[in-house]
Amino acid sequence: MRIVDVRATPVTVPLKRPLRWSFGVEVTTTRTIVELITDEGLVGIGETRGGDEIVRAIELHRDLFIGLDPLEVGRITRRFSVFRMTSEQLALVGAAKLAGTAVEMACWDLVGKILGKRCGDLWGGIERERIEFAAYVFYRYASTTEVGDGDRAENAADHADELFDLYGFRDIKFKNGVLTPEEEIRSVRLMRERLAGRLRYLRIDPNAVWSVETSIRVLNELADYDLEFCEDPTWGIEGMSLVRQRTPVPLATNMCCVTFEQIPLAVRTRALDVILGDVHFWGGPSSVLQLAKVCETFNIGMSLHSDRELGISTAAVLHVAAAEPMVSHSIDTHLIEQADDIITVPFEFRDGRLDVPTGPGLGVEIDQDKLRFYHEYHREHGEASEFADAMQADFRAKFPKF
Ligand SMILES: [Mg+2]
């Protein structure tokens, strides 16, 4: 069997409400959906973050996978691994690296379809059929025209209530670094009070917006609220290490350690307790499985990161979590904040969990009507948002770095 063609389709799907984080406001997600076509008519599907630049990268690097057998997925992944370079070079090779993750995903989907096996079984064997997620809690604006009460502690606490009631979560990942630290501490207190008896683990993620001193002060104040961990309180491995020496709260990252070459310094400086793997940032599902072995070696915990993926990447994430027991913290998802999906049977949360798909390969299929619809939406609206730009400017003016 040979891969004879590829279709790469950028799509933009709106979020239900604008989500705030320390970099600004997000109102959509833009992804590229990859379909690999074989000479026997089988189609494998993959997804990655980003739009038009990914499509260009796939066209440019067709020779890395066209003409190969999808069963040579390791060989194809190694060809793309030339783009898994150091963090400084990421800006140059980012699109090609991310394109490779969608191609790898689509190859695994094909391998599963050829062998009649699920991806999780190909990746070592499915250990669990249901995967637990944390409720992803944000400060949200009411709409793209109304701010609402998005500047108050209650806004995030209300979101937590809503997610627990609707989807049965037990854990919270609270995206903060948006309001003043005092107002955000008040949000944490409200969540602990209102969800007492229902809330198990609570983690926060200010996305590196705090200084080292602010991180130490805030985390020591939050120690009373039993944080599971804090993701990226401050910038860089050295900064994280300084914070970790002076707080009892475990630290996690999906920002300062996102490539293999960053791991030695992070381990040497005792900067991290938990790494959030990401099937795109790290270079594909097989890279996250390699990362799990490294984390096991150095006694680093693991969770999995979400960057507003749609259903195909969510399926890949579920198979990784199902097959890799090192992923022991509940994992991230934006799925419940997205207005729609491009797969035929969208995922539904029960008890804060999703079922691992049962079909061969990734176990999900593209809804071609929706793919066309959100491709058109992407062409009309692109990735830019005037609302997000305006809110971002407003946010920067109001809250410079603490
Ligand atoms: Mg994070």
Image (cartoon, rainbow, N blue to C red):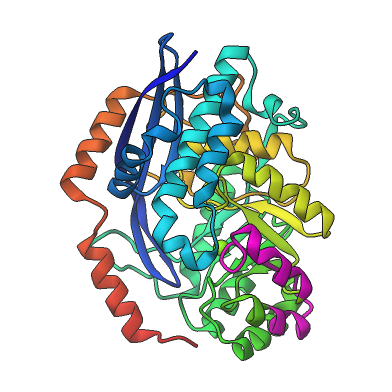
Query: Viewer-proximal residue, 148 or 361?
Result: 361
Residue 176 falls within the magenta-colored stretch: no
Is 387 positioned to the left or the right of 214 in the image?
Answer: left
Is 164 positioned to the left or the right of 268 in the image?
Answer: left
| Chain part drawn in magenta | 241-268
For the point 75% across and 77% down, the residue is: 269
For the point 62% across and 13% down, the residue is: 115
Q: Can the viewer see residue 169?
A: yes
Outermost residue to the left:
380
Residue 256 falls within the magenta-colored stretch: yes
Looking at the picture, how far across and down is residue 326, in whole percent?
Answer: 77, 47
For the point 41% across and 28% down, the residue is: 343
Q: Is residue 135 above or below residue 60?
A: below
For the point 68% across and 40% down, the residue is: 321
Is 137 positioned to the left or the right of 51 in the image?
Answer: right
Query: Viewer-proximal residue, 9 or 352?
Result: 9
Outermost residue to the bottom:
213
Q: Quadrant of ligand 1?
A: bottom right
Looking at the picture, how far across and down is residue 228, in whole percent?
Answer: 73, 64
Q: Is residue 334 above or below residue 311?
A: below
Looking at the picture, how far across and down is residue 390, in whole percent?
Answer: 24, 71
Q: Is residue 364 above or below residue 236?
A: above
Query: Viewer-proximal residue, 156 or 220?
Result: 220
Query: Viewer-proximal residue, 177 or 84?
Result: 84
Looking at the picture, how far across and down is residue 112, in whole percent?
Answer: 59, 19
User: In this figure, what is the number of numbered marks?
Assistant: 0
